[in-house]
Image: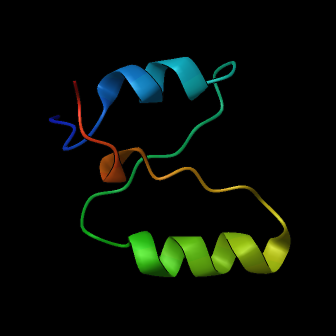
Amino acid sequence: MKIHGDSGALLEQMKGFHWMLSYGDYLKETGYALKKVGVEFLNVSASKPA
């Protein structure tokens, strides 16, 4: 697995053991669905590593 984004931010934001990973580019669809059910969405791929 390769993370295209800020892996440090991913590790900082990962609270506990509940997180989701999917293959493919479904950021738009995922963000839309999570907004509808009131779940916060943090896109770490938008962040660039320092």
On screen, 27 above or below 13?
below
Quarter of the picture containing the C terminus is: top left
Picture quadrant of residue 25 = bottom left
Q: Farthest residue in the right direction?
A: 38
Q: Is residue 23 left or right of residue 19?
A: left
The residue most toward the front is 50
- Which quadrant of the view contains residue 28? bottom left
- Residue 22 image point, x, y percent: 37, 55
Q: Is residue 40 left or right of residue 22?
A: right
Q: Residue at x 49, y 81 (%)?
A: 29
Quarter of the image where one finds residue 38: bottom right
The structure's colour scheme is rainbow
Q: Is residue 12 above or below residue 24?
A: above
The answer to whether 50 is drawn above or below residue 39 in the figure is: above
**Residue at image x 23%, y 29%?**
49
Residue found 31% across the figure and 33% down from its top: 6
Q: How many marks?
A: 0
**Where is residue 2 shown, x and y percent of the image?**
15, 35
Q: Is residue 7 above or below residue 26?
A: above
Q: Nearer the viewer, residue 31 or 50?
A: 50
Which percent across, then down, holds residue 24?
24, 66
Residue ID at (41%, 69%): 27
Specify the quadrant that holds the N terminus. Answer: top left
